[in-house]
Amino acid sequence: MAMPQTRSAAPILRIILAIFLCSLAGCTHSPGASESPTPDLSVRPELHLPGLLRLRSLDQLVADKYNSRFLFLSAVIRGQSAASAPQLLITHDRTLYTVGIDDSALHPAPWSECRDDLGTVAVDPTLTWLACYDSIRTVKFFALDETQAAPVAERKTDPVWAWPIWGPSAQQLTFHTHARTCEIQLVTAGEQFTTLTPTATLRFPEFDVTDPPQGGCNLFVDQWTPDGSALDMDGPYGQNMSTRTLYTLSRATLQTLLAGASTSGIPPVITITKGMLTDLGTMRLPVAWNPSGKTLTAMSLNGKTIMTIDAKTGEQRPLLDLSAQLQFPEVCSVLWTPVGGALVIRLCSGAGDIGSPPPDQIYVYTPPVTPTE
């Protein structure tokens, strides 16, 4: 009786051995494989559009993408001379740098004592003074004169105050607060910033957070217009946690409320209701005022088109469409140069970034027609 034939184990062993050796060697699919390659999310593709300039000199700051990939767009100041381009103030690893918007002359800023983790510095409307908040109740004031590196004044603030924004006038600052309710503090600065005197507290009770019990605020106060005529602020996040309602408060409305407040010598507490605000509709951060104070710049709902928004009507118009080149909503900051001729755009890690996100990039966009409205 013939014995049944058996299949040799040698081919199977060879296959197992080949798979093992291939795993050690890091084999890849052959060029004819049907699967598409996985994109490298640690590299951000460069944007190429008319009028858009990438500031490549900043690449040296974020060369170590694992530890120091963050750039923070802090402010725009005058160039070193009347003929030179305006300069950006960039914060990187708690160090302030200046760089021309034409990608020239990257240097550590002379005001070396201005150190901040997130670049929350404030420049006054006349581009004369720089205020730096160091997160430990201290504000340092510097003259934007590169021959004066030391602060002209250093002031302790109230424990409730947080970082400042400049306005509504050149001698006034508006402080965010650490309060359990929605409020901001208006402060008047003395000559050469010898004093910081509270003048009024603005309360926004309709935006108070009641859960959790320790309270909070669903309103982010952003910036005054360069002429101090209006203040923009962002309401609570929508259901998708990416869009917010944009509001503005006019200085005329505020002055009327201040004029009717008590004059007992104690800084008044002014209640601001939603009815006193202008609702400009739903948008996506970030937001920036055009220097004219007549329009704002913000992102479209999908986060890939930069829009201009009429500050009176809320009408939105596209300014720069990035949808064909942005993989994710990656625009984190926008800022107009003082004369409104160029828009500075910061790209940072998008929602889809995993693993090691790419370093930040900064671009300067010069529109074909300068927005004057």
Image (cartoon, rainbow, N blue to C red):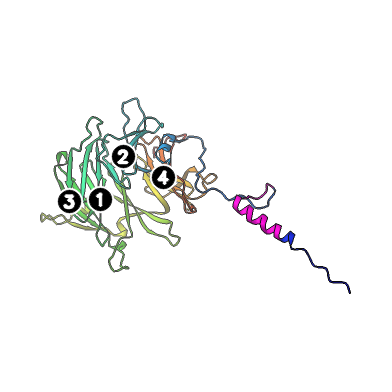
Whether 142 is drawn above or below 138: the answer is above
Return the residue nearer the eye: 280 or 329: 329
Mark 2 vs 1: CB contact within 8 A:
no
Evaluate whether residue 297 shows in this view: no
Q: Secondary structure at mark 3?
A: strand
Which mark is drawn over residue 135? 1
Q: What is the three-letter code of the residue carrying label 4?
A: Arg
Determine which residue is flagged by label 2.
Answer: 96
Residue 344 placement, left or right of 139: right
Determine which residue is flagged by label 3.
Answer: 199
Q: Label 3 neighbourhood size at 10 Å, few (<14), some (14-19), many (20+)?
A: some
Determine which residue is flagged by label 4.
Answer: 69
Q: Secondary structure at mark 1?
A: loop
The residue under the point 31% across, 28% down is 80
Which residues, given as a range, are shown in magenta? Answer: 13-31
Q: Label 4 neighbourhood size at 10 Å, few (<14), some (14-19), many (20+)?
A: many
Of pointers 1 and 3, the one earlier in the residue sequence = 1
Q: State how far apart marks 2 and 4 are (Cα).
A: 15 Å
Of pointers 4 and 1, the one earlier in the residue sequence = 4
Residue 1 placement, left or right of 80: right
Q: State how far apart marks 4 and 1 are (Cα).
A: 22 Å
The residue under the point 51% across, 35% down is 50
Mark 2 vs 4: CB contact within 8 A:
no
Q: State how far apart marks 3 and 2 are (Cα).
A: 31 Å
Q: What is the three-letter code of the residue carrying label 1?
A: Ser
Of pointers 2 and 4, the one earlier in the residue sequence = 4
Q: State how far apart marks 3 and 4 are (Cα).
A: 40 Å
Q: Label 2 neighbourhood size at 10 Å, few (<14), some (14-19), many (20+)?
A: many
The quarter of the image holding the C terminus is: top left
Position of residue 366 measured from the top left corner of the image (x, y, whole percent): 44, 35
